[in-house]
Image (cartoon, rainbow, N blue to C red):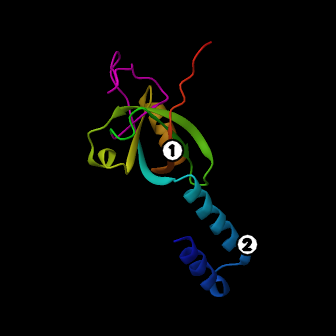
Amino acid sequence: MKTLTIALLISIVPPLLEPCQVWQALKRYEFIEEHQLKRVKVSCYIAPEGAHTADGSPCYEGIVSSNSEHLGMDCIVYDSNLVAVMRLECRDVGGHPMLQNGTAIDIYRDSMDRAWQLVGEYGTHVWVEWIEREEVTNK
């Protein structure tokens, strides 16, 4: 697949792209492949005071809802420039089909203002990388 992509990029260099643009596109593609990033729709949710997540945790900023496959994992969120902007804990499972099939995430926010702020800053889609949660223990 990588060879095909490189060949495709090279074939369009003369008419459309400068060599620097090809190099940037290739580096972007390599980064996405290396980190197994997936572009997903992002939304936010708020919950009533005292609400709990699917794993029994109280709701707090720093959690994300996805599907049961990702429950217990962490999610690194990247903006459209592939800059890591936040790390969230997947502690909730959503009922929306896009959440269930892994094409969306729902980030918990304390208020609607905070939700609008996030969507205003990053738009409706982000890149995500799912990683195993590293439990911190006090010794």
Tell me which residue sits at (37%, 51%) in the image: 103
- The amino acid beneath tag 1 is Gly
Query: Given this view, does label 1 or label 2 mark the residue nearer the observer?
Result: 2
Q: In this view, does 13 lie above or below 118?
A: below
Counting from the top left corner in percent of width and height, residue 84 is at: 61, 44
Residue indicated by mark 1: 120
Q: In this view, does 101 lie above or below 22?
A: above
Specify start and end residues of the magenta stretch as a single range: 44-67
Residue indicated by mark 2: 20
Counting from the top left corner in percent of width and height, residue 78 is at: 56, 47
- Quarter of the image with the C terminus in it: top right
Quarter holding residue 80? bottom right
Q: Is residue 26 above or below residue 132?
A: below
User: Count the marks: how many?
Assistant: 2
Q: Which of 55 and 109 is in front in this view?
A: 55
Label 1, secondary structure: give it.
helix
Tell me which residue sits at (54%, 77%) in the image: 4
Q: Which of 98 and 4 is in front in this view?
A: 4
Residue 93 among magenta residues:
no
Q: In this view, does 7 lie above or below 76?
A: below
CA–CA distance in space, label 1 to label 2:
30 Å
Q: Is residue 60 left or right of residue 85?
A: left
Q: Callout 2: few (<14), some (14-19), or many (20+) C-alpha neighbours within 10 Å?
A: few
Q: What type of secondary structure mainly makes up the magenta span?
A: loop
Counting from the top left corner in percent of width and height, residue 10 is at: 63, 81
Label 2, secondary structure: give it.
helix
Q: Residue furthest front?
A: 139
- The amino acid beneath tag 2 is Cys
